[in-house]
Image (cartoon, rainbow, N blue to C red):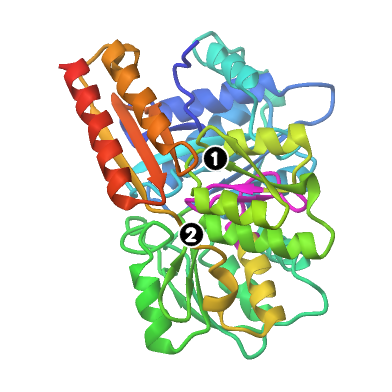
Amino acid sequence: MARKYFGTDGIRGATNVSPMTAAMAMKVGMAAGAYFQRGDHRHRVVIGKDTRLSGYMLESALVAGFTSVGMDVVMVGPMPTPAVAMLTQSMRADIGVMISASHNPYADNGIKLFGPDGYKLSDEAEAAIEALIDGDIPLVPSDQIGRARRIEDAQGRYIHFAKSTFPENLRLDGMRVVLDCANGAAYKVAPSALWELGADVVAIGVTPNGTNINDGVGSTAPQALAETVVASGADIGIALDGDADRLIVVDETGTIVDGDQLMATIAASWARQGRLAGGGLVATVMSNLGLERHLAAQGLGLVRTAVGDRHVLEKMRSSGYNVGGEQSGHIILSDYATTGDGLVAALQILAEVKRSGAPASEVLHRFEPLPQLLKNVRFAGGKPLDHDAVKAVIAEAEAELAGRGRLVIRPSGTEPVIRVMAEGDDLAQVEQVVDRICDAVRKAAA
């Protein structure tokens, strides 16, 4: 059953437009606070945010909602999403909240919820909270209203945690690192962590003003990083997104390294150290076939899931893997974190480059990606993929690519769009296959 407010990663939308209003944020605080009132102890919620202008408004509304149902609030200010998950767990809180729209423009915002174990909520928990949002939530007596406080050492706690994931026998002395924090949540903690480990840090995207988050900087706009790496003669560039749960890297030549190459690098390193669990890694259907072939050549497996880091993490937890992620840069290392953590993943990459003594361009380019093409077909209504003519074209394309490529066709979860992706050894063949399917979908939707 479709949910009313929660999407694939919390509640998200344009601010001051339903559902991303202050009134809704207060209701979310009331509902989530009521849902997590379990036991007789004094209940606590940790609230973090990124650097969007609307974060102040939503933070205040959430505090009002949580305290009105008797929950104490700890505010940690601008912090990465994985830091909020970590602090929720380490502070024995009952729930964690991150106010962020990740890599979206500043005018959007969102609310992500974490349980006491630091993991994102289950579908069942989100459904129960939605039901409470639309209901009549009882308020506590005036003498039981929660208290709110802001803690000042949250950044130091997260920096200490992140550094603890870096090999104790290594330092980053002599390595010049350009770090792009997307004018987002990690603008203080990430440069500090790398500097404390000995790196010569050239920081960009560290001057947030409330409206410049992800604006021409960060993992979704890595050109500024690439130009700075080359201009400054740096050894490597690291780009995070607005809430720092995503990582993209640039090598010393200015070439972008995506999540598939980064996962391959970490998996190989961990396999060599005897610490790779599951005999491979978990990625989504969008990861390049080149990654799958590369891992197979090393005797490692690749398990694919639906798009979304939530699906990746679910498979990792159920099947015993400790490395997983997405081509877009969400990388989950479950030995350390309960969600994607761009800084922690970056530290594993930096450790491997430092350990090898070779340039990043040699260390991080593990395989040659197969030509991959993705096109979107917008439709007005109905279910074009159920049309017999579309099914026939898809079956023909799958037979044509068998053994030489791969086809992924899926409807968008957020808009009336069919996404058609193909990859294979022959770019011309890939283009022809995608165009034929797109044409068939358009005719079926006409």
Q: Secondary structure at mark 2?
A: loop
Compared to residue 106, the image places residue 407 above or below, namely above
Q: Is residue 335 magenta?
A: yes
Q: How far is mark 1 from mark 2, CA to CA?
A: 14 Å
Specify whether residue 36 is in view: yes
Residue 307, x across and y down, in percent = 50, 36
Q: Magenta: predominant secondary structure element?
A: loop
- Residue drawn at x 67%, y 61% is 266
Q: Secondary structure at mark 1?
A: strand
- Residue drawn at x 38%, y 23% is 395
Q: Which residue is mark 1?
A: 284
- What is the crowding at mark 2: few (fewer than 14 residues within 10 Å), some, or many (at least 20)? many
- Residue drawn at x 31%, y 63% is 216
Residue 308, x across and y down, in percent = 52, 37
Specify whether residue 21 is in view: no
Q: Is residue 253 left or right of residue 276?
A: left
Q: Is residue 216 magenta?
A: no
Q: How many marks?
A: 2
Q: Is residue 58 left or right of residue 77?
A: left
Occupied quadrant, residue 17: top left
Compared to residue 365, the image places residue 315 above or below, namely above
Q: Which residues are magenta?
A: 324-344
Q: Quadrant of the C terminus?
A: top left
Compared to residue 276, the image places residue 231 above or below, namely below
Residue 230, x across and y down, in percent = 39, 84
Q: Which residue is mark 2?
A: 258
Compared to residue 414, the image places residue 406 above or below, namely below
Residue 22, x across and y down, in percent = 41, 32
Asked whether 74 or 188 is in front, the reply is: 188
Q: Amino acid at mark 2?
A: Asp
